[in-house]
Amino acid sequence: MRKACVSGRFYPGNPDQLRKAVEGYTKRLKKEKAVAVISPHAGYMYSGRVAGCVFSSVEIPDAVVLIGPNHTGLGESASVMTAGEWETPMGMVEINEPLAELILHSASGAGVFSSDELAHLGEHSLEVELPFICLHNPDAAIVPVTVMPTAWTECEMMGHALAEAIRSYKKDVLIVVSSDMNHYESDRVTREKDKLAIDRVLKLDARGLIEITQDRNITMCGVVPAAIGIVAARLLNARKAELVDYATSGDSSGDYDHVVGYAGIVIK
């Protein structure tokens, strides 16, 4: 069992308070089937509104691949937790073992993913998405994947492997990319930089996203997971992306000198 590590810090640790918080961020929107989404992973007071808009916009199937950045540096460079369950205040979330094995052993991946638990133990980027998933589909099972910074060729390979595994699974799967946007610059600069990155995502241009974040020093922590997700989504016949919400931490904190950006994007 993977214990919750940021419960009570990034989001309420009390089940009733957490459910009420997530419900408060939920919008009455028409839910559509999506191939992938990009959702932020900061404390809910900062990014909960954007995450709530993302998960209110899409149908959550019983199988979800969660892919996010490895902030801790622990474990393997591309880590899949293949068995067990994750603890949340709203209940346990099981790992989808058949889908995890398909990802791990995909021919397209050529061993690029590793079975590993260490990378997940203290990592918050996937955990904060779970209450939203639990609220909208309590039966959803997940495949947790974290990745460290890597080259474009590796991103492309992992995207192909992920798409191949999802096709082989033959059931509906939603890819949830966990990513915040630019970090710790002014609100004005962050919004300008984030627009450059978001424009690449909206064009489903994974390589362009990697290149623009490098060329313009856009500190999008989940750029590699996002590129992998876009590659996979295109192979799974996604044709468009939509920005459903955007905010910076300044909108909540009032500090506009050092902000983090948050984008909610649906790919379908």
Image (tube, helix red, strand yellow):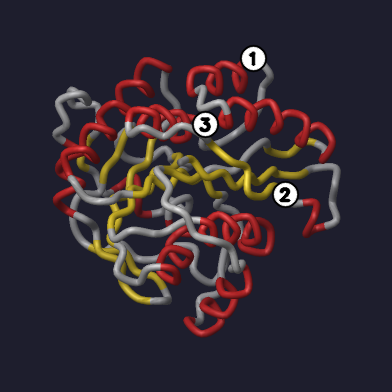
Residue 145 as seen in the image, left or right of residue 42: left
The quadrant of the picture occupied by the N terminus is bottom left
Relative to 251, residue 158 above or below: above
Residue type of the residue flagged with mark 1: Asp
Q: Are marks 1 and 2 in contact (CB under 8 Å)?
A: no
Mark 1 or mark 2, whichever is nearer to me: 2
C-alpha span from label 3 to label 2: 18 Å
In the rendering, which numbered label is found on residue 247?
Answer: 2
Q: Are marks 3 and 2 in contact (CB under 8 Å)?
A: no
Q: Report the front residue among 45 and 108.
A: 108
What residue would you read off at disc 1? 215
Determine whether the residue tagged by mark 1 lies in a helix, strand or loop.
helix
C-alpha span from label 1 to label 2: 23 Å
Q: Residues within 10 Å of mark 2 (few under 14, many from 20)?
A: many
Residue type of the residue flagged with mark 2: Ala
Residue type of the residue flagged with mark 3: Val
Determine whether the residue tagged by mark 3 lies in a helix, strand or loop.
helix
What residue would you read off at disc 3? 223
Q: Are marks 3 and 1 in contact (CB under 8 Å)?
A: no
Q: Position of residue 14 (x, y in %)?
A: 51, 81
Q: Residue at x 20, y 46 (%)?
A: 100
In the rendered structure, which disc, 1 or 2, sits on the residue that comes first in sequence?
Answer: 1
Q: Position of residue 20 (x, y in %)?
A: 57, 80
In terms of image quadrants, where is residue 258? top right
In the rendered structure, which disc, 3 or 2, sits on the residue that comes first in sequence?
Answer: 3
Q: Position of residue 37 (x, y in %)?
A: 48, 45
Q: Residues within 10 Å of mark 3 (few under 14, many from 20)?
A: many
Residue 61 as seen in the image, left or right of residue 226: left
